[in-house]
């Protein structure tokens, strides 16, 4: 098989904060890890370890402000009515009722929710919550356990942190208990190292269950009370430098054939077809990617991003050669997908938001007809000319953005 080779060495000169992955450091496997630790990354010098937040932090309640709760009787009526409709829907589905009867029940459910929709936007109580992500405590534990290692342990720098409240109350899953489900953390260290405060604004759905049945108002609120309604999680990002090498092998002729195969009748190549090509789990006939990294987490993160970038570039390259014109073309670049919760990018989302023009175009018209240009199309010529594999070898040094998430458990007064 014919191969051509492209070798590129790309080294970024722009400075960036954070560790360079180098877990191949001598003695790194001997570092002792404390309980409830989120892990660490060694820097290039093998003398410094950047510690991540632990998976679980602490939460306490600092105070509350209660709003007008006079409509809490409506909450009881609302939930009781909705519960009856939900039971009837389940019974109808299990009994094999006709579609019309089931639809009528869903319409009834929708009408009830719409009638009481303002309950989810009406503030019931604002609860001041104190959080500690425990990263500084984790750093101290690493230092104590590894005092003879000669390694400096520091906290990794977090950015774009926010608190997300996930529904946990026993009510209907479609109902929200919060006025604001996500809140930015503006000052991570405002109440101590690694600590911050957030005002959790409960709507009437969330506040009314906290009423003391004997006093008729909301008394002392414990962390367990909040956890029974919503589960707070801190979502954070951190950027680290990464050095890795990859080898991309691609056959443009095979890709052109794929483009023809996924094109609709008449030679239209649609935006959705780009996602079909880039998201496919089997691209070995036209694209292969090998990557080596000092830390496997770099490869987990960077491989998907790199593969997606190269695939989109190659698709554009082929379409530039064989497309007659564009239809519905918009040059507005898309937004790169954020990494997933476990630090891996969501390739599918990235494909649908890719910045290359053909991902953004509604459709392009391809020259795939043998009757065009005297019986020989540009596509046929392109396939004959590019029927070989090209290898692209790149060593790259650039920042990699990761995302993490941690939960919280209640802390006593």
Image (tube, helix red, strand yellow):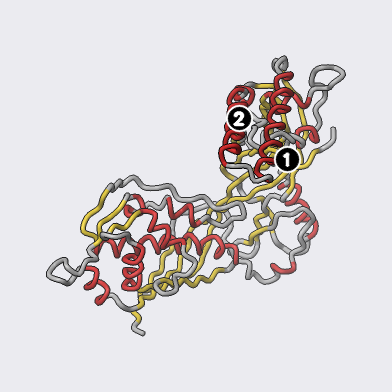
**Residue 190 in view in this figure:** yes
Indicate the position of residue 109 as horizontal and vertical percent values.
Answer: 62, 31
**Which label is found at residue 132?**
1
Q: Nearer the viewer, residue 220 or 29?
A: 220
Residue 123 sits in quarter: top right
Q: Nearer the viewer, residue 172 or 244?
A: 172
Q: Is residue 394 left or right of residue 362?
A: right
Label 2 crowding class (10 Å Cα cut-off): few <14, some 14-19, many 20+?
some
Earlier along the polypeptide chain: callout 2 or callout 1?
A: 2
Q: Is residue 325 left or right of residue 15?
A: left
The residue singled out by tag 2 in the image is 108
Q: Is residue 112 left or right of residue 305?
A: right
Q: Report the quarter where the N terminus lies.
A: bottom left
**Residue 186 in view in this figure:** no
| Proximity of marks 2 and 1: CB atoms separated by less than 8 Å | no
Residue at far bottom of view: 1
Indicate the position of residue 59 as horizontal and vertical percent values.
Answer: 76, 37
Identify the residue at horizontal 69%, vertical 67% (top origin): 28
Identify the residue at horizontal 68%, vertical 30% (top origin): 82
Identify the element where label 2 is drawn: helix
**Which label is found at residue 246?**
none
Q: CA distance from mark 2 to mark 1?
A: 44 Å
Residue 393 sits in quarter: bottom left
Q: Report the quarter where the C terminus lies.
A: top right
Indicate the position of residue 55 as horizontal and vertical percent values.
Answer: 72, 50
| Vertical position of residue 7 compared to residue 358: above or below | below
| Vertical position of residue 203 compared to residue 17: above or below | above
Q: Is residue 386 left or right of residue 403?
A: left
Indicate the position of residue 386 as horizontal and vertical percent values.
Answer: 28, 75
Q: Nearer the viewer, mark 2 or mark 1?
A: 2
């Amino acid at each position: 098989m014919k191969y051509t080779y492209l070798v590129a060495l790309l080294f970024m000169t722009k400075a960036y904060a954070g560790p360079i992955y180098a877990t191949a450091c001598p003695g790194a496997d001997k570092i002792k890890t404390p309980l409830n630790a989120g892990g660490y990354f060694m820097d290039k010098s093998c003398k410094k370890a950047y510690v991540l937040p632990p998976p679980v932090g602490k939460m306490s309640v600092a105070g509350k402000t209660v709003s007008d709760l006079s409509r809490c009787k409506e909450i009881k009526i609302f939930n009781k009515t909705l519960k009856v409709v939900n039971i009837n829907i389940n019974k109808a589905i299990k009994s094999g009722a006709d579609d019309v009867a089931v639809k009528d029940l869903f319409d009834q459910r929708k009408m009830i929710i719409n009638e009481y929709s303002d309950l989810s936007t009406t503030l019931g109580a604002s609860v001041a919550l104190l959080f500690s992500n425990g990263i500084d405590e984790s750093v101290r534990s690493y230092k104590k356990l590894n005092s003879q290692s000669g390694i400096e342990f520091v906290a990794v720098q977090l950015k774009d942190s926010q608190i997300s409240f996930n529904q946990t109350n026993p009510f209907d899953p479609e109902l929200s208990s919060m006025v604001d489900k996500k809140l930015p953390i503006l000052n991570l260290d405002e109440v101590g190292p690694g600590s911050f405060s957030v005002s959790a604004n409960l709507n009437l759905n969330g506040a009314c269950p906290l009423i003391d049945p004997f006093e008729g108002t909301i008394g002392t609120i414990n962390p367990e009370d909040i956890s029974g309604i919503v589960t707070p999680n801190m979502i954070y990002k951190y950027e680290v430098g990464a050095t890795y090498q990859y080898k991309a092998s691609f056959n443009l002729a095979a890709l052109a054939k794929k483009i023809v195969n996924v094109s609709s009748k008449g030679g239209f190549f649609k935006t959705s077809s780009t996602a079909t090509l880039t998201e496919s789990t089997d691209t070995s006939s036209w694209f292969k990617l090998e990557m080596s990294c000092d830390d496997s987490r770099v490869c987990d993160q960077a491989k998907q991003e790199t593969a997606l970038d190269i695939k989109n570039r190659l698709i554009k390259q082929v379409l530039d050669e064989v497309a007659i014109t564009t239809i519905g073309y918009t040059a507005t670049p898309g937004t790169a997908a954020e990494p997933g919760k476990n630090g891996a990018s969501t390739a599918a989302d990235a494909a649908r938001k890719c910045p290359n023009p053909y991902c953004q175009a509604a459709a392009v018209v391809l020259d795939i007809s043998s009757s065009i240009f005297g019986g020989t199309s540009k596509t046929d010529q392109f396939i004959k000319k590019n029927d070989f594999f090209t290898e692209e070898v790149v060593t790259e040094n650039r920042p990699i953005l990761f995302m993490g998430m941690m939960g919280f458990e209640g802390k006593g007064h």
